[in-house]
Amino acid sequence: MLTVGDTAPEIRAKNQHGEDVTPAFEEPTVVYFYPKDFTGGCTIEANEFQDALPEYRDSGITVYGVSMDDTESHADFAEEHGLEFELLADPDGTVAEAFGLDTSEGYTERLTFVLVGGEVVATYDPEMADPAGHAREVLDETRALAE
């Protein structure tokens, strides 16, 4: 798994709208990996990132959610929950593997990376079953790191 100080990987994936996305990771960016759309903990986490999204944007921080679900699942998940940040579809695990995550079970663990200036500046391993409060913690700490 990538750790603090590692160079940001070059990734490319489709978002929930089917558009190709290639993040540069120069500006403060949060990439959070989650196991599966429409599951309990993943829905809590996505909704909390959405609730805090105006504050992320005001602070110049981009948020990406990534799972091994396809674009159709992401589109349905985003629509049902009003998610306005990009969900990157990673059905073959290429993005997860670029971050050093295990994809052998067909999903990734719940892990979050903060990248600034082309490198990893923080990592988070929220409780798999209860990610409540995670989006706020990441926001507060990323603001401090980006200053």
Image (cartoon, rainbow, N blue to C red):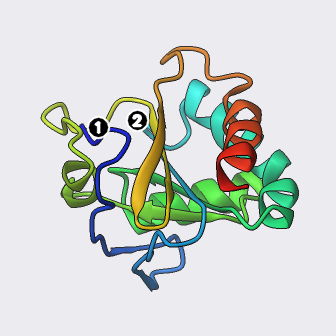
In which quadrant will I find the N terminus? top left
Specify the label residue 35 is tagged with.
2
Structural crowding at the residue carrying mark 2, measured as other residues with C-alpha within 10 Å and reported as few (<14), some (14–19) or many (≥20): many
Q: Give the residue type that dot 2 points to.
A: Pro
Of residues 73 and 63, which is closer to you in this image?
63
| Left or right of residue 50: residue 65 | left
Tell me the residue at 44%/77% (across/down): 24
- Residue 15 appears at what percent x and percent y? 48, 72
User: Element under label 1?
Assistant: loop
Structural crowding at the residue carrying mark 1, measured as other residues with C-alpha within 10 Å and reported as few (<14), some (14–19) or many (≥20): many
Check the image and report above or below for 45 versus 55: above
Residue found at the very far front of the displayed protein? 147
Of residues 110 and 137, which is closer to you in this image?
137
Which residue bears the numbered disc 1? 107
Check the image and report above or below for 14 versus 86: below
Of residues 72 and 116, which is closer to you in this image?
116
| Left or right of residue 20: residue 26 | right
Check the image and report above or below for 21 versus 25: below
Q: Earlier in the sequence, mark 2 or mark 1?
A: 2
Q: CA distance from mark 2 to mark 1?
A: 5 Å
Q: Give the residue type that dot 1 points to.
A: Tyr
Tell me the residue at 78%/57% (across/down): 56
Check the image and report above or below for 9 versus 40: below
- Residue 22 appears at what percent x and percent y? 39, 79
- Residue 146 appears at what percent x and percent y? 67, 55
Tell me the residue at 65%/35% (across/down): 45
| Left or right of residue 15: residue 38 | right
- Residue 93 appears at what percent x and percent y? 21, 53
